[in-house]
Image (cartoon, rainbow, N blue to C red):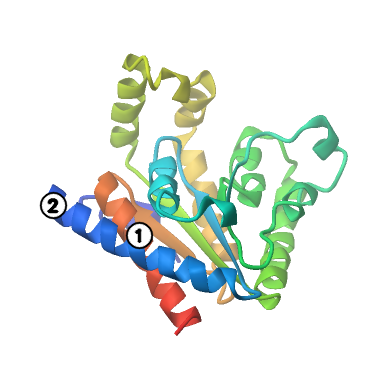
């Protein structure tokens, strides 16, 4: 079982030169894989979860910045619209599933039902407990249809999150990235960790395993994610 408290968050890249060299190498490899993907009937779906300010956006940027944007879609998942509330909560995700030859990234995802909706009481206990099986069925359906599905959970320490929050709040170019909702989530840190660990226990399947990324050092988080992604694509496109 994945225990977030047991992660070694001190992992980092030795130097900026090493970071740049590895980043360029993995980005070029991803571009080559994207060209092969575009000629196939396969799809790629990447799911990103984790605490606020864990670095999800920075990782996603490094994945996509050298790719052909015509075949990439990034969905930033926020609270459902009035129309989406009228349907089963998974309904709004089906329209976002990638088409053949495309890469889709979910910046937060259907796991909101098991994380923030559970902790904040937006979903009843019956609803979020039922969601474990519903999500596993959804992911199995995607994989059986040829989707390369990878799930990443970026985790940072509570101390590092506070440092990033304060830095964002003081930066006029980034203050929009911090809100009262972020501070409220932080006050329930323990509950969010407990929800995440139960999520791992119930949804870390052979079909769609979780990749937990140590995020206190952004360079390490970006390189580890790219490394795991390229490793998987080498297996899928030998």
Look at the numbered discs 2 and 1 and tell me whether their residues touch, using CB distance below 8 Å: no
Label 1 neighbourhood size at 10 Å, few (<14), some (14-19), many (20+)? many
Name the spot of residue 20 as percent of width and height, x first.
21, 53
Residue at 55% x, 71% y is 37
Nearer the observer, 237 or 70: 70
Which tag, 2 or 1, sits closer to the chain's start? 2
Q: Residue at x 25, y 55 (%)?
A: 8
Q: Residue 27: give its label.
A: 1
- In this orientation, which residue lies closer to the viewer: 207 or 196? 207
On the image, the x and y values in percent for residue 228 come to 38, 67
Task: In the rendered view, tell whether residue 95 sits above or below residue 26.
Answer: above
Taking 158 as reference, is 3 above or below it? below
Which mark identifies residue 17? 2
User: For the view shown, which residue lies furthest in the right direction?
Assistant: 86
Which residue is at 20% across, 58% downward?
A: 21
- Residue 69 screen position, x and y as percent: 53, 51
Rendered-image quadrant of the C terminus:
bottom left
Q: Is residue 217 in view from this perspective?
A: yes
């Amino acid at each position: 079982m994945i225990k977030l408290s047991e992660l070694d968050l001190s992992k980092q890249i030795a130097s900026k030169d090493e970071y740049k060299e590895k980043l360029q190498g993995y980005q070029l490899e991803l571009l080559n894989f994207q060209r092969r993907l575009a000629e196939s009937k396969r799809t790629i779906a990447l799911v990103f979860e984790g605490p606020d300010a864990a670095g999800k956006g920075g990782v996603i940027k490094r994945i996509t910045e050298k790719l052909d944007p015509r075949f990439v879609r990034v969905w930033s998942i926020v609270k459902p619209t009035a129309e989406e509330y009228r349907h089963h909560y998974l309904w709004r995700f089906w329209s976002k599933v990638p088409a053949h030859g495309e890469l889709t990234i979910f910046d937060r995802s259907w796991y909101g039902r098991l994380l923030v909706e559970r902790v904040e009481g937006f979903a009843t206990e019956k609803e979020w407990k039922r969601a474990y099986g519903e999500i596993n069925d959804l992911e199995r359906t995607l994989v059986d249809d040829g989707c390369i599905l990878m799930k990443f959970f970026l985790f940072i320490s509570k101390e590092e999150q506070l440092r990033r929050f304060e830095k964002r709040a003081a930066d006029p170019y980034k203050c929009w990235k911090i809100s009262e909702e972020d501070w409220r989530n932080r006050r329930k840190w323990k509950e969010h960790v407990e929800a995440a660990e139960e999520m791992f226990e119930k949804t870390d399947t052979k079909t769609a395993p979780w990749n937990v990324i140590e995020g206190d050092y952004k360079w390490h988080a970006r390189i580890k994610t790219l490394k795991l992604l390229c490793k998987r694509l080498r297996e899928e496109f030998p």
